Structures are given as C-alpha cells and as structure tokens.
Amino acid sequence: MEDKPIYKYIDSIEFGLLSPKDIKEMAKAKVVTPELYDKEGYPVDGGLMDVRLGVIDPGLRCKTDGQKLKESLGHFGFMELARPVVHISFVSVILDLLRSTCRKCGRILIPNERLDEVKDLLDKISLEQGPHERRDKIKEVIASLRTISKCPHCAEKQQKVSIDKPTNFLEDDKRLSPIEVRARLEKIVDEDLLVFGINPAIARPEWMILTVLPIPPVTMRPSITLESGERSEDDLTHKLGDIVRINQRLFENINAGAPEIIIEDLWDLLQYHITTFFDNEVAQLPPARHRSGQPLKTLVGRIKSKEGRIRTNLIGKRTNFSARTVISPDPKIDINEVGVPLMIAKKLTIPERVTEWNMEYLKEFIKRGADTYPGSNYMIRPDGKRKKVSDETKEQLLEEIQPGFIVERHLMDGDIALFNRQPSLHRMSMMCHKVKVLPGMTLRLNPAVCAPYNADFDGDEMNLHIPQTEEARAESEILMEVQTQIISPRYGLSIIACVQDSISGNYVLTKDGFEVSRQQAIDLLASAGIENYDKLPNKPRVTGKEIFSTIIPDDFNFTGKSRLFAKNPDDPDAIVRIVDGKLVSGVLDSNNLGQGSGLLLRNLHKKYGADDIILLLRNINGLGAEVLLKYGFTSKISDIDLSESAYSQIDKDKKSAYKDVDKLIADFRSGKLESLPGRSMAESLELRILERLNKLRNEAGLLVEQTASTDSNTMKMVRSGARGNNINIAQMSAVVGQQALRGGRISQGYRNRSLSCFKPNDLGADARGFIQTGFKFGLKPYELFFMAMTGRDSMMDTALRTPKSGYLYRRLANAMQDLKVEYDFTVRDASKKIVQFNYGEDGLDVSKTEGGKINIKSIIESVK
Amino acid sequence: MAEKKKIPITHTLIPEHTKLSDDEKKKLLEFHNITIKDLPKILIKDPAIKHLDVKENDVIRIQRRSSTAGESVFYRGVVNE
C-alpha cells in the first residue's frame, strides 16, 4: 500500500480535569503497598513498581501490553485515598468557588434574574475582546460576590471564607475539612459553573479535591542501578512511597477507630505528602527532602524553571557534529576561516553521497580508514544501515559501495562550519567560516573577528558546528558567512576591521617619512602575500603611502580625517585623501582602519562588496604585520620616560593640586566652602576634591602627549589608536591618580580613616586613596592597599553584573523576539499590533547607513 | 462650581498631544490597514490629554523629539482602562 500522509487539523484544545472515574478507568493497576521489590528483586504486585505499570528492567515484560523495555510506554495506576485531599494547583479556584457560592444551597450568589445578564455580558466580552478580557471580567465578578452576606436564592446568611495557606480553608475561622469542601463543591449546579468559565462536562469542581490519586507509569520514574549494584529510586517513587505508607496508616487508624486527633494529624500529613508530590516549592511548606538534605524534584519541579523540561530539553536541544575547545589567534589565516585541530577534523564528518563520478574519489577516503587523515568514519547504505569504517571492514565496504551510498568523510579545508561564542548576544556571535585544518589542539581564528564574538584568548572556548546537508551549507554561507556580517546592524559601520598590530603597522607604513628601496618594498609586499606590483611607482625609493596604495582599487576615492586632525588640523597627515586609488595624504590609524569608526572600510564595502573587503582586509592586515616584522616594533620601559622639564612640571602641577585640596579642606573645616546645588557641604567637598585630582591626572596626560617622544613605539601605539591612551602612559610615568570605591574616594576601613597609617579624620588626598606616583616608580605600601581595594571592588562588580545583564538580555529577547518591520515601516508584534509607527522613528535600516546616517552629499557626488 | 479651564501641561518631558479629527483618524487607520485596537493605547484619564476633552476610541497624535529622526509622530488610541 502506498504511504499516504494523514492530515489532521487542530480545531480546538480542551482542558479539563480527571474525574475519579476517569482515573480508575485509565489505571491498569491499583497500588496498595509501599513495597517495591520482593526478595528476588522482582517488582511486587500492587506495589509502586508493579509490572502492569510498565517495565524498566531488561528481560521483563509489561503485564498490560506484553511489550519489553523501551517498547512499552508504561501505564497509569491508581490509589484509593483514605480521606480526600486538596489538589494544590486548584486551591485558588476552590477558594473563589467557595466565596462565590451559597454555603447551604450551593448556588452562585447572583440572583436568578441577573444570572443571564452576567452570562450574556461575558459572552459578549469574549466575542468582542477575547478570552483574556473575559477572564479579567470573571475575576471582577468573583471579587464583587465576596461581600454578599445573604444568599439571593435561599436567604442563608453567608460566612467569610478565608484560606490558611497553603491548603486549609477556613469559614469564619473554623476549619473546613476537605470532605466538607468537597460536599460544597458538589452542590454547585452546572449552569452556575459557566459563569466561572468552567465547563462542567469536562471539569466538575469537586474533582479538584482528590479522592483517588493517579500513580504515574514506572517509565517516567525509572530507578538507576548504582555501580555497587544498589538500586536508587527516582524522586517521584520516593514521594509516592511516602504517600502510600501514610495512606495505609490512615486507613488502619480509621478502621481501628483511633481518636480524631490522630486521624487528623495523619490526614494533614497525607495532605502534605500529596501537595509536595505535585509541587515541592510551595511557599509556606518546607520542601520534602532526601536523607542527604537536598530537596526532592517532584512533578512541577520537573517542568518548571531553567533546569526544567521546557528550558533544558525542549528549547535547549543538544547537537551532534559539533566541537568545542580553547581558542587562540592566528593572523595568518583569513578572517572567514577557522583553524580546526587535526584531532577534531578526524572526528567531525561531512556526509557525501556516492555517484558514478565521485565513487573513485570517495573510495580513497574509505581506503584511508578512520585514523589516517583525510579518511572516513562511517558509510551509510541507502537502507539507512550505518557501517563503521575500520581496518577489518574496509575491504568489505569497498566491495559493497555503489552510487546512492553515503560516505561520512573527515572535515577538510574549505568545508563549511558555524563558529560560535557564548553568550550569543547578537547575530555576529555565530558566523559561518571555512574550515582550515591545522596542527595543534586549539580552534584558531583571525584576531580581526574577535570583536564580533567578543572573544579574547585568556582561556575562552568556542563551539564549532558542521552543517550536514547541502541546504544547510548553502543557507549558512549566504546568510551568515563572515563577510556578510562586516557591517554591524547596530551602528552601520565596520565591526570587523583592523586591530592591534595591523593598525600600528599601517600607521608606521603610511606615516610621512617612511621610505624604502623599491626592492625592499616588493619584498615587503611579497611577504604580505600581495603579488601585483603594477601600481608601485618605478623609481629607486618608494614611500610607505605608495606601498599601501598598491592594495587599494584604482577607481577608489575617499576623504577622511585621521586622529591627528583633532589635535592639529594643519598637519599634512591629518586629512586622509585617496584619489584614484592612491593614498595622496594622511596617515592611516584607528580612525579609518579600526572597528566601529571612520568610513574608509565602510565606503570600500559599499563600493566593492563584502567578498572583496575580505581580500582587502587580508592584505591590509598582512601588510601591517609584515611592516612590524621587518622593521621591528618593541615597546620598552624607557619609552615612557619623560624629560627633566616634564617631571618638574608634573611636580609643580602636583604641588598646586595638593595646595588646592588643602585649601578646600580648610574652607570646609571653617564652614566657608560653597556647597554645590543639592549637595551637603561634605558632599561638595568630596566632589570638588575629586574634580581637582582628576584634573591633575588629565594635566599629566596632556603633558605626556606634548612631551613624550613621537618616535617611541609605545607612543606610536597610542597615536595610532592601536592600544593605550595618554592617560595610561601618564599613569605609568607620572601619576596613577585617584582610586575610586563606590563612586567616591576611599573613606571606609577604620574608624574615621581609610587605613591605620593615617590620622583620624584626615581628608587629604593621600589619606583618601590618591596615588601620586606613577607605576614605574612603584607604589607606597598604603597606595598598594588602595589599589587592591579598588581592584577587588571592580572584580566583584563584574562578577555580579554579568548574571544581571544576562537576565536583562533574556527578558528583552523574549519580549521582542517576534517584533517585525512591516511594509508600511511600522514595527508590529505577532498579533499585528503597532509598536512603533516608523522603524527607529526615522525608518532607516542602520546596516545600510554610514554610522546611522545617510550621507546625501557623497551620493550626489558619486552620481555627478 | 464653574468648570476650570483646561490647559495643556507644559513640561519639557511631555511632548505635544493633539486629537485627530475623524477624517485624519480614518485616514490613519486606512493607511495602516488596522482597527483602533491595533494602535498603542493611552488611558482616557492620562493627565497629558486632559485638556483635549477626549472620549474612548479617539486617536491622539503625539509629536516627540527623537534622537534619530529629529521629530517623530506617534499615535495612540484612547481607552477607558
């Protein structure tokens, strides 16, 4: 017979309650004893592990359906409760019902003549506004019924029903037993229930009080056998054992005619066990625990929260064909490549279908086997049978192979892989790379893609996934290959750009004054992997700018500002000008090459497209690295030495700052200090002092900028924007500056002083954590203590902030996950309700702008 | 008691609220192909629209300063709770 798909359309879903009758009917066994196994270790009949409830031991057969382990899905059992018990999940519903119905006649506390009116109103609301609004209205109705003191049907006086959490109902401070509660719920007539939104056909309220307890199948609470041969039962089985045991004791005591107090105690205990069986995290109840003290994981606990079924097993699936190890940098591989250790390449495979044309090729993979690279691990026959490739099976597989088979061959250069680093905060956190199999044990990536992954190499690990079908590979390449992600959708500029060495190298190269022989230039270009020297001018000496120009396309024009521009607009290197693919003026620094700044890369991307940018970036990076390699680039301590005059200037600045601080303190003590608006005098003093001392550090930074030698490599890094800034240099060579704790100066530690080496109430700069020497000269003991204090503070801060921001992100992502921009530019949610009338209020797709703006001038210029 | 004259709140943080005429309202709803329920909401007793004398299902235009677009227009449907 032909396989025909069966189509079913879900029209509606009904949620109801199991009636005691339902429970008994679906049950395949009655549980009567808490014993699990007999002396031989065979499940006891009528016990919790009864073979009629399913099997978890190999060899046994389920008595209900005759199937073996893993075939039988298991069956429910049931247990007769000695006394009825409240179901914890329905306590609030029961309370609502008790409050809204008559204690005598069981009718809803709405007069007959108004009943239809209310029902009609509810129907109208659900028709016009939807089920949520209906539910809100029902809540309102219930709230309005609470105050009615006389039944409109039988004129019975109504008592106040309250709840003693979690499960005790009180009427006028007298306890209602579950039996009484159940009797009341039974009295409620079907028509009245419709007002509460309960369909009596599938959910009678008295079923919320349990008289019969369904016992879940053995298969959903399997026991595990420990290495010692001991059996360890599932948490649910433990809990059910408690319930059965107490239930039996309750039966026995009732039959023996025990005093009411004892019965009630046992009844409460049964209520406790059944409550915790459903939910072990009820607010007012102590959670049931193992003997070791850890709380049991019962039904609700299995589903709820991060470790529950939904978030771990349904949303969080695990994948095959993936790898994870430590990452390390490799500037020699392309930005869209990922270096994969050989060991991993031999484990991860790509399925290749055998055809007439590639059969010989694929046979080679089988011949090489699983251990020699590149080999293969498995061969799959068209019938789905998977055969391992090994020395023993090789011969046979080679005979068997024919078109239609699939060979799972090792990962090879050029294969497609997805590369990912958690937390995956934006789409660039998972990009598609081309595999490059390398020796070593780490995954390698080009340092230029550290920024989108937010990766560094202090022990970071990353994940690699290998798409297994042609569709998956095509989709990955088109949607998420590295070059498609160069422009950040956050700010419309290049997020993948030059970093570190690449910036300082190109700075050195393109700075005025760099000049080498043509021979050396070609040597440089060749080592950087550039082979076209047409653009290099034919003269004995060439400049760095001319060397750099060889990698820029001939028809490219650009004008931009370098970092120099801010300081000295007249400097010949301040304006970067590229005319017809030639760098005419300007030095290339982080303003134009760095990530998230400058338009050089953005314009190149716009003009030549993503794929060419990858090549261009490779050349720029290569050139930068090669310049540093060939001409040397060492950072030394003497780089941060300042001149004699600079030191005396700093001393002068320091003295004047200290004098100012002392003056402020003196003013404060004599009460002459002017308070800032909205601040007390003490606060004003703190702010003033902080301001003054920060000014001192900035002065030092400025001084460093002015006096430090331009040609030292450390300063080159600062000037090019590759790493470090003037303040960093000033902290090393002149003054570390104020150590801030919780946004202010360090004040706590001892009584009225920060450290015991200071006098109490000393408000001076030194006593409150100002470090007045540079790192180079070493810190005084108390200065070191201040550093340690702020160091620990900032470490705590990061450690505490990470989970906070993670949760914030989770909430944002969940709230916004199905917002979408429609064709009329409105942002709408899943139900097409408008959230924003014009996307981003300006309707711009940021990834198609230049830094969030559209440069109309340049567009006009380009079409002129 | 004589009714107080209603004046709009003037504050830098409260943008200008105006009521749409029936024509404008119809045009807006038709342009976006929506009903009034699909609009963002504003409560009828919101202090910012007290001076406008609005009733349920009116549409309020809000002209805001925007960091991206300079000025942006937003609409809200008046709801009673």
Image (tube, coloured by chain):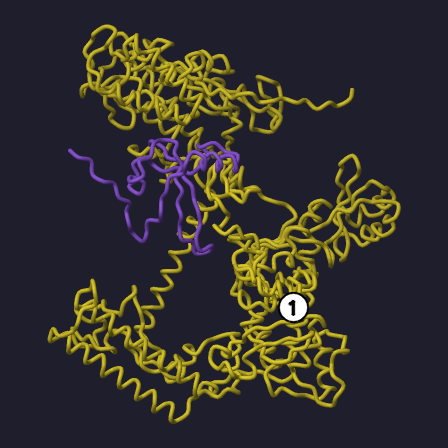
Chain colours: A yellow, B purple
Q: Which residue is mark 1?
A: A617
Residue at 49 percent across and 78 percent down: it is A718
Inspect this view and state whether residue A95 appears.
no
Residue at 46 percent across and 32 percent down: it is A234
Position of the N terminus of chain A by quadrant? top right
Task: Answer with the quarter of the image where residue A667 lies.
Answer: bottom left
Task: Answer with the quarter of the image where residue A727 lies.
Answer: bottom left
Residue A90 as seen in the image, left or right of residue A227: left
Residue at the top extreme of this rendering: A154
Position of the C terminus of chain A by quadrant? bottom right
Task: Tell me residue A752's x, y (percent).
Answer: 17, 69
Task: Tell me residue A744's x, y (percent).
Answer: 27, 67
Task: Pick whichever, A303 or A648, lies toward us.
Answer: A648
Task: Tell me residue A773's x, y (percent).
Answer: 34, 82
Inspect this view and state whether residue A426 appears.
yes
Tell me which amino acid carries mark 1. Leu
In what element is the residue under mark 1?
Answer: helix
Position of A713 relative to A204 (above/below): below
Position of A415 relative to A774 (above/below): above
Chain under disc 1: A
Residue A13 as seen in the image, left or right of residue A627: left
Position of A135 relative to A82 (above/below): below
Task: Tell me residue A126's x, y (percent).
Answer: 42, 22
Residue at 37 percent across and 9 percent down: it is A191
Residue A809 as seen in the image, left or right of residue A756: right
Residue at 22 percent across and 15 percent down: it is A259
| Residue neighbourhood size for the residue with mark 1, other residues' Cα within 10 Å, grouped as few (<14), some (14–19), many (≥20) | many
Position of A434 relative to A772 (above/below): above
Residue A810 as seen in the image, left or right of residue B2: right
Task: Pick whichever, B65 or A753, lies toward us.
Answer: B65
